[in-house]
Image: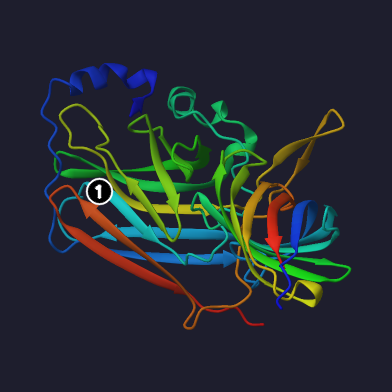
Amino acid sequence: MKVLPRLRIFVATLALCACLPASADAAMYATMRAAFNPERLGAPTTLSLSFRIAGGGAPTLLTGVELRYPSDLGFATSGLGLASCSPAALQARGPAACPANSRMGAGSALVEIPIGPEVVKETAQVALFAGPSQSGYLQILVCVTGLSPVAARLVLSTELLPGRLNIPVPPIPSLPEAPYVSVMQMHLTLGGRLTYYERVRGKDIAYHPPGVGLPRSCPRGGFRFAASFNFFDGGRTNARTTVACPRR
Amino acid sequence: MAQPARVLDVRDEGHLRFLKSSGSVIFDEGPAIGTFPGKVRVRFTYNGEPTVTAQFTITGAHGSISARATGKLSSPTTPNPSFRGSMKVTGGSGRYAHVHGSGELFGVFSRRNYGLTVQAIGKLPY
């Protein structure tokens, strides 16, 4: 967790104050949506994923997300993440520190910060990058940057396993004496109109990487996605969605 | 009286170009040069596991040889990760209808254009 300079003083204070997470509500539930654009079997596509966590009571501290996706989607053969970004550089300097060819997608997140009786909402920008591989698996870095009212940057690291993506979410400090930030919504786009560069005869030529490959056949019932959300109090909720088979 | 099996000493290299894909499966094709020249067609699977698989067929003047290989991919976040592993012959046709044996496969996968450079090495009785 890296807090931007203007709030460094608050972070120092945070070390002294007891910042307890908001209490979890047993009635928390989650919904998710997934979409391909274009929807054409056998062709590269852009994958969009959205999550929303809701429920009565105070916001609940999310500690991890496990995403499950069809294992025959061509993530590893997407042409995305041809360079890797240093997590330390990303944490220190933000997305500008990463090579263009390491960018894999973008998105946004809605977080909630309980301050006294009120809940303040903040929208943060999300950027996805390829990180250095340590075990032979592709590494994805999720960079979440919020500016106001809490200026903070969070870099999450996860391995792209076949059909599975585990994203641990560490506690995100907010304002002094306020509970941690709770992630309530997230929208991610993997692929999209990214610009990469390749060296051809001494010149950098721009191109657009193709994106996630869809298989040539659709599974019966469509492409199934599911996610499990784990909370600080040990609670857990699940969500699932299906992308219908594209028309031929 | 049975004739002793002849041995095909394969040391081939292929520079293959992308034909089509289906999710995490890439189909490539191209010429093979070496001790068993001909045409190579490969079905290459890379689903995010460090282990990749390649099913390929080399078709020469007097028949074809099919094999399956698994290999470990190194440096997956580079534009051209390499892999090496073992291959096992799964079948043949023509003069090589009874080919069998195993060998090694080396390769480089272009994540930019999905091309493959592969080298197959093995002594295969037929």
Residue A29 shows in this picture:
no
Tag 1: residue type?
A: Leu
Q: Which residue is mark 1?
A: A62
In the image, taking residue B35 as reference, residue A93 lies left or right, namely left
**In terms of depth relative to the viewer, which is nearer, A73 or B1?**
B1
Q: Looking at the picture, how far across and down is residue A180, in whole percent?
A: 21, 37
In the image, taking residue A94 as reference, residue A147 lies left or right, namely left
Colour style of the rendered protein structure: rainbow
Q: Chain of mark 1?
A: A
Q: Please, is residue A165 above or below residue A225 in the view?
A: above
Q: Looking at the picture, how far across and down is residue A193, in whole percent?
A: 66, 50
Q: Looking at the picture, how far across and down is residue B115, in whole percent?
A: 74, 52
Q: Quadrant of residue A104?
A: top right
**In terms of depth relative to the viewer, which is nearer, A52 or B101?**
B101
Q: Quadrant of residue A39?
A: bottom right
Furthest-front residue in this view = B1
Query: Which residue is pictured at 14% across the width and 53% down the height?
Result: A234
Q: Please, is residue B105 above or below residue A148 in the view?
A: below
> In the structure shown, which secondary structural element does the residue marked by tag 1 occupy?
strand
Residue A154 shows in this picture:
yes
Query: Which residue is pictured at 79% across the width and 56% down the height?
Result: B17
Image quarter hosting the C terminus of chain A: bottom right
Q: Quadrant of residue A47?
A: bottom right
Image quarter hosting the N terminus of chain A: top left
Q: Looking at the picture, how far across and down is residue A88, in whole percent?
A: 44, 25
